[in-house]
Amino acid sequence: IGCWILGVSQAATQAQIKTAYYKQSFLYHPDRNAGSEEAARHFTRVNEAYLVLGSVGLRKKYDRGLLSREDLRSARKPSGKEGLATSAPLPKRSQTFAASQPSTKPIFDFDKFYQAHYGEQLERERFLRERRREQQKRKEEAEKRWQAEGLQELGVAVLFVAAVVLLFYSK
């Protein structure tokens, strides 16, 4: 069921599962679908499917049919790193900030992350926006042509009526 919800095959890799999760969560996120009960339910199912399939240990239990509700309650969101035990608690780190020491750790590039996970969706939306703009432009041009043709026809009609009136009064 989890594979079906995320839209991946049963032989999907952790990277494919993670990518499918990000795509689905982007589409059905409650912030993007305000007020939609269906989207909220689907978002919850996507999160639960990723919780199970994204964790190597929970996925093995799920595949064997041994997954329990207690496993789900105690599970943490997958880190996306294969082979790590998901049930072992992470050590707490105390973080100290020293302004004088240069950081060797690179700054997180959110733009790169966002592009990697939502790039296809962003490109599709950009394409659709551009297509709507082009359609709007064609519609406006067609209206202008129609107005110009209408004025032209009106001018011809006025000339015709004027010619008929001149002929009628000239006799």
Image (tube, rainbow, N blue to C red):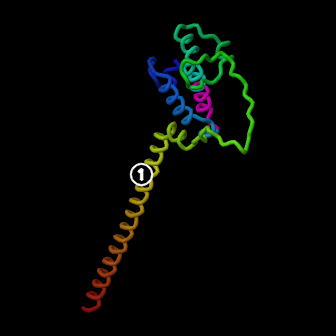
Corner quadrant of residue 150: bottom left
Q: Which residue is nearer to you in this view: 94 or 76?
A: 94
Q: Which residue is nearer to you in this view: 31 or 19?
A: 19
Q: Which residue is nearer to you in this view: 131 or 38?
A: 131
Q: How many marks?
A: 1
Q: Position of residue 168 (x, y in %)?
A: 28, 87
Q: Amino acid at mark 1?
A: Arg
Q: Residue at x 59, y 31 (%)?
A: 38
Position of 91 relative to 69 (above/below): below
Q: Residue at x 57, y 19 (%)?
A: 55
Position of 6 relative to 154 (above/below): above
Query: On the picture, is 90 further left or further right than 122?
Result: right
Q: Residue at x 59, y 32 (%)?
A: 39
Q: Main secondary structure of the magenta part?
A: helix
Q: Quadrant of the C terminus?
A: bottom left
Q: Position of residue 63 (x, y in %)?
A: 52, 11
**Segment tinted magenta in the rendering:** 35-45
Circle 1 — which element? helix
Q: Position of residue 125 (x, y in %)?
A: 48, 45
Residue at numbered disc 1: 131
Binning the other alpha carbons within 10 Å of mark 1 as few (below 14), some (14 to 19) or many (20 upward) gives few
Position of 7 relative to 153 (above/below): above
